[in-house]
Amino acid sequence: MGNLKCPISMESTFFLLVLSCSVLLNLMDGYSLKDCTVKGSLNSTFMKVLCYKRQLRAVPESIPCKARVLDISYNKISVIKRNDLGDLTNLHNLNVSNNMIEEVEDGAFRGLAALQELNLAYNRLTTISGGFFQDLFNLTELRLNENHISDISSSAFVPLISLVMLNLSGNHLQYIHKAQPVFQMPRIQELHIGKNGFSSFETCQASNASLQLQVLDLSHNPLQSFRITADIFPHLETLDLAFNKVSVKWDVQDKNYFRNVDRLNLSGIQTGLKEMKIMLQTFNLTLSNLRLYYLGEQKAKSLAKEACLINSLTTLRLQSNNINSISENELRNCSNLRVLDLAENDLTEITALAFKSISKLNTLSLSHNKLSNVPIAIRNLSNLEVLDLSYNSITTLTCSDFTNLTRLMMVHIYRNHLSSVEHCAFQDLHNLKTLIMGSSRLFTLKGYFSNGLKNLKYLDLSNSKLNTIHKGVFECLRNLTYLHLQDNQIKVIEVGAFEGLQNLILLDVQSNKITQTSISASVFSGLTNLKELILNNNFIWYSSQDSLSEPPFKNLKSLHVLNIFSQGKDGMKNIPSNFLEGLTSLKIFWAGNLNLNSLHPDTFTYTPDLWRLDLSKNYLTTISPDIFMPLKKLSSLTMIQSGIQSLDFLIEANLNEIQVLLIRKNSIAVINETLETLSELFLLDLQGNEFSCDCDNAWFIDWAVSNNNTQVLKLDALKCNYPPNFRGNLLIDLDKDSCVVDVGLLCFVCTTSFVLLTLLSSFLYHFLKWQVVYTYYLFLAFLYEKKQQKKQTVQSFQYDAFISYNTHDELWVVKQLLPKLEGEQGWKLCLHHRDFQPGKPIMDNIVDGIYSSRKTLCVISRHYLESEWCSREIQVASFRLFDEKKDVLILVFLEEIPPHQLSPYYRMRSLIKKRTYLTWPKPGEDIQVFWQKLDAALEAKENS
Ligand SMILES: *[C@@H]1O[C@H](CO)[C@@H](O)[C@H](O)[C@H]1NC(C)=O
Ligand SMILES: *[C@@H]1O[C@H](CO)[C@@H](O)[C@H](O)[C@H]1NC(C)=O
Ligand SMILES: *[C@@H]1O[C@H](CO)[C@@H](O)[C@H](O)[C@H]1NC(C)=O
Ligand SMILES: *[C@@H]1O[C@H](CO)[C@@H](O)[C@H](O)[C@H]1NC(C)=O
Ligand SMILES: *[C@@H]1O[C@H](CO)[C@@H](O)[C@H](O)[C@H]1NC(C)=O
């Protein structure tokens, strides 16, 4: 035994060394990155490396240098070190936001010459040092908002010669002169320095030269003084002064300084009305877009009146001002307005002539108010194109509500209390393209779509109470392309319901009460251009796989996407064999969560173009490869939580085009070499399977770590479930050394020693004949003595039997064998999953286990014969058999294995010829006899 142990553990150390080195090396070259997901193929120029939300405390190592996008946001990184980002010379976009970064070492970004966007927002930076942005000559967008920055080195932004947008909002700069370096950047166009505690803004503190700035955001600062004394903003277009919570002293010496400002945000400003009117005057010449939120009804209305005097004003936004009503005169001056936004107010009424003077208006938002009918006032808006009435309390649409609005293109009227619509309500809306009237209280669609609406393309009637779709209700909507009927109570669909919709591309009827009867007649006929049909979350089910006399989709020749997942509480149960008949163009089929136990072999014979298939959450443990045979173009297969135990069915089905394989949460224990036949595979998700931490997976780990074509998602987090003492261990940490130990090597060592020994003994015999003879007799005597001693002391074993089995048979061992032999018959068993010492090489554990047990019981199945590890157990046991001349082996066959199938396992065959063996009874045979025989075999004396 000592001889056996020593070479192995020496080798173990050696292999462990080699192995750990190669793992490190491979992680650098390979595709399956630790802690990250790679999007895009390895050689593509658009490779994205996504490592967000991984609890990382440091920048991950070994990011491929081809990466174009790197996202390490939402982690716990506190420092970016000088060499963390190495030479990601292709990186264009780096997101490090939402970490805990306090420090970025000087030169940390120096290799990132191609970087264009850098996001460092939501961290804990306090200072920006001189070397911070070294070499970022191509950077165009930089986000540093929501940090604790109070100091910026005067040279920090010098390298950023291409920077166009900088966000420094939410820091602690306090004085404008501290932000001076940001005004010095030659290309800067958009600057956000809101929420920094600035109490004054004076041009002389910012810059003395004229700037390129177009957008200046100074919102959420307690500005007490605003002094513009020089022409440094000749290009400024947008100025945001919102939420200045103190009274500002406004001093703009020349209106001309803001000659290009056309957008202004004065929301939530505390300053008095008089001062604000002076502010507005400053922009008298060019202002076109004014935002006045959170000012209160009176202030907002007075300012609006004032603002409307500015001829150039076309967009006025007055959200969240608690406005109750609008009377005739209030918008009198606003005749140039094109866009009026009154959303999020308390409007209950609008005087009939309120909008009389704004007849040029083309967009009006009245959403989130308290209107109980469509305001009569809108009838004056003959140029209106977009009308938003969502989130009000409108109950009825009458024939006069939209009269004269012939230019309307889009109406939002969802989330009202609509319970009736008059027949002629939409009759004037010849140009309407989009009508969104979901979340209503409508039970049925009467004829309202038969007048007008001949250009309607998009109709949303979702989330209402519709229960029946009558024949012909949509027949005038010749141009309808998208129809949303989801989340209703639809149970009856009359034949011809979708008649006339020959341009329809999408029909969404998910989450209704549709049954197999609702779709049994050809209700979908006429939809000759339909590309996508969404039928999930209904109540379709079939009692068998028998073919249907009228397959529901047989007219949908153009359909690309069919969605039927989740049907009723008990699921769809069966897919009839010709359910998909007619879908010759089907590309994508979502059929998860249907409570399917099997599929008819003809299921997919009608869909030769299927490209993407999702069968998740069905219990398809015994799925046959034949089912997938017709799917020659299948490229993405998703079978999450489907009870799959092996990937063999894929290989046997010849799915050679598979690129994406998502088989999370199944019961796969072992992935073997055959996986390599899926040569196009580039994404493999195996998370949450029940891997076996043994040599059967050694190939898979090597392959996953080193191959450059397939990315195994979160490879570093895959966990083992077997053997039980390894449960929860990481698969990638598998101690593969014991797998590398090769019996051939052992034999070589033995043979060599034997040859050398023979040579040596013949040499000795030749020259030292008499001494050798003497020694021989001495040795015999010693042996005899040993034997005598042994006879006196009863040899004690730690166990009665060592159980050798394959993980596939673990259930039988744990559920059947263990309770019977240990529980009832009182034998003490040695099981590798339970009794092996962790940390010790597996081979040593096997040898120790076998030698400290009286018998070795092999549980033989096909899996057992195929597993290399187990056959090594047989080798050790049979070695003991010859070594000790003891009958220690008991063979239990779990399944009938004909002798010719045993021929590759010649050692096993020869063992069977010599030893008696037991076979696990077939169903119906007497189990009791088996257990008695096994008990007897265990009891038998081991001396043969
Ligand atoms: C990426 O490599 C594959 C072969 O490995 C090659 O067929 C493909 O053209 C390459 N793509 C690019 C963009 O270089
Ligand atoms: C920087 O941008 C310029 C112009 O877009 C480009 O020509 C140059 O290659 C970029 N530099 C790097 C290192 O990518
Ligand atoms: C805007 O300025 C012009 C002349 O510059 C003046 O006539 C007009 O009254 C001003 N408008 C407002 C709203 O102050
Ligand atoms: C519709 O417009 C016409 C003139 O274009 C006008 O005479 C008529 O009164 C308007 N109808 C309503 C209901 O406002
Ligand atoms: C459908 O729309 C097209 C333009 O997209 C238009 O030419 C055609 O007249 C419309 N059909 C009907 C019936 O109005």
Image (tube, grey):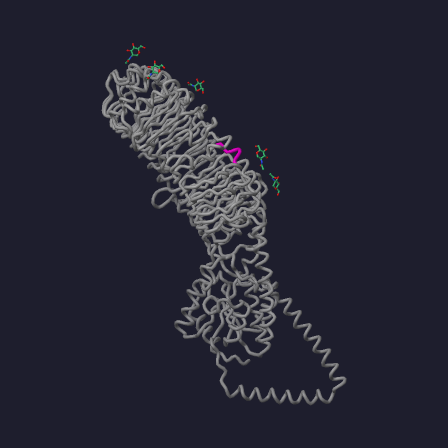
Instruction: Kindly identify the residue that appears in the image at 53 percent across and 67 percent down.
Output: 842
- Measuring from the top left, give residue 775's x and y in whole percent: 67, 88
- Mainly helix, strand or loop, the magenta region? loop
Looking at the rendering, the stretch of residues picked out in magenta corresponds to: 160-164
Whether residue 413 is situated above or below residue 678 in the rendered picture = above
Q: Which sits in the foreground, 732 or 400?
A: 732
Q: Is residue 163 magenta?
A: yes
> Residue drawn at (32%, 20%), measured in percent from left and top?
307
Residue at image coords 59%, 77%: 883
Location of residue 470 in the rendering, given as x and y in whole percent from the top left corner: 33, 27
In this picture, residue 600 sits left or right of residue 339? right
Between 734 and 126, the one nearer to me in the picture: 126
Residue 293 screen position, x and y as percent: 31, 28
Give 819 or 829, whichever is nearer the viewer: 829
Quadrant for residue 381, please give it: top left
Q: Is residue 364 magenta?
A: no
Rendered-image quarter of ligand 4: top left
Query: Can residue 194 be spotted in the picture?
Result: yes
